Amino acid sequence: MRASVCGGGGGGFGCLGWGGRGCRAPNLNDLGAIGLNDLGYEIPAAEAQGARMGNNSSESAIPLGTRTVAGLQPERLWNAEGGLRWRARRLHLEGRMFDAELADPIVRRTLLYPLGSVPASLAGLPVRANEPTAGQRAAGVTTVSTALDPRAVKAFVNDGQARYYGVEAMGRAELARSLRLEAGYSWMAGRDLYPNRPVRRLPPQAGSAALRWNPARRRLWAEARVVAMGVQTRLSGGDLDDERIGASRSRNDIAAFFRGSRVAPWLDAAGRFRPTGETLGEIQERVLPRSVAASDTVRVPLYRATAGWWTVGVRAGLPLGERWTLEAALDNLADRNYRVHGSGVDAAGFSAWCGVVWQF
């Protein structure tokens, strides 16, 4: 690792930069994950050796050349960072840039098998061939699935090379003896290099600003904060299939859910969904019309982007001792409906809370 620092000491202009390299060995989850996950059923790579590796983790993956699944190897990282810092009596500004190259990253990939040569079981669980997409049929392969999930079986493998680069900045201004303004911003891009495409679960640009009041001779503090996230349109194939992001569905998936135990209590004697009065066919046509999904087995993303959002909140605290603090907050004052990218959970509306915090 190399590092360099320049500039003054207590104030004024300064700069710093460093570079380094490292590696990460496969962990227990990489080596032994088995069962349902957010993209379908998953097995260890050791149980899938001989399968052809898909070019991504989507249901429409096609073979990545002639590569077959092999044992996992460590992933390797090369990283360089640089930044500038400026300090004055009441002002502090700082910005950084980074560029990281990741070789042989451990990622999920769809398993593919030659048409007519699908194994009877994987990792001790029976599997069956899925209906291949046009691209898979042209390549002479198909995916497989289990009785537990209709989506293609996946595995963690070493695949390709990725590059991450971005910037982050922060600032702090002492507006008065008891009033401070803080702000921050971050942006990151990530690409798989071979082929060139977005990496999975890439966060959108984000920013925040907070105005904090803390009387010099009192322990009470209060803060108003704004947090904002940008739109994320750079989605990978896995993102589009991920239930928490793109939420790909087929008409068959909708039918399977409609006929399941969760929906049954909401059906009338004629088989209509009581809250809307729709039949299964009407729901399928509303969610995935034939003009979008020509086949019942083709999965189509319901969302191709995560919307941007902003929210405002206030909070206050009063230390009760060395380790105890009484805190209260009002969150999402504008009652915005938003979702943090990749979380799969819509945020709560306007809410209030109060509690005692203990630090140890």
Image (cartoon, rainbow, N blue to C red):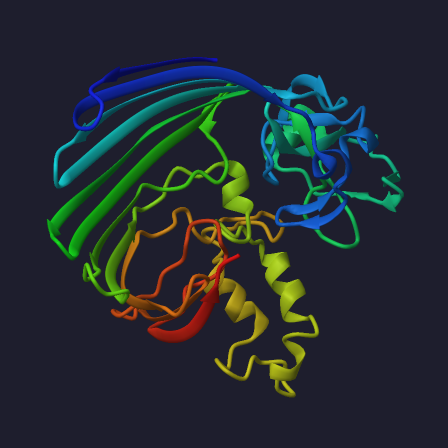
Q: From the top left corner, tell me how far across and down residue 293 is, in percent.
A: 51, 51
Residue sitting nearer the eye, 217 or 114: 217
Q: From the top left corner, tell me how far across and down residue 346 is, in percent.
A: 43, 63
Q: Is residue 142 visible?
A: no
Q: Identify the residue at image location x=37%, y=30%.
A: 189
95 vs 247: above or below: above
Determine the residue located farthest toward the left in the rendered image: 176
Residue sitting nearer the eye, 97 or 50: 97
235 vs 147: above or below: above
Residue sitting nearer the eye, 223 or 352: 223
Q: From the top left corner, tell me how far across and down residue 116 is, in percent.
A: 82, 32
- Which quarter of the picture shows residue 7? top left
293 vs 83: above or below: below
User: Quick check: 3 left or right of 185?
Assistant: right
- Which quarter of the picture shows residue 100? top left
User: Quick check: 210 left or right of 344?
Assistant: left
Q: Identify the residue at image location x=78%, y=38%.
A: 32
Q: Is residue 100 visible?
A: yes
Q: From the top left corner, tell me how far across and down residue 108 is, in percent.
A: 63, 35
User: Quick check: 246 left or right of 182?
Assistant: right
Q: Identify the residue at image location x=55%, y=40%.
A: 238
Residue sitting nearer the eye, 352 or 73: 352
Number of dots carrying numbers: 0
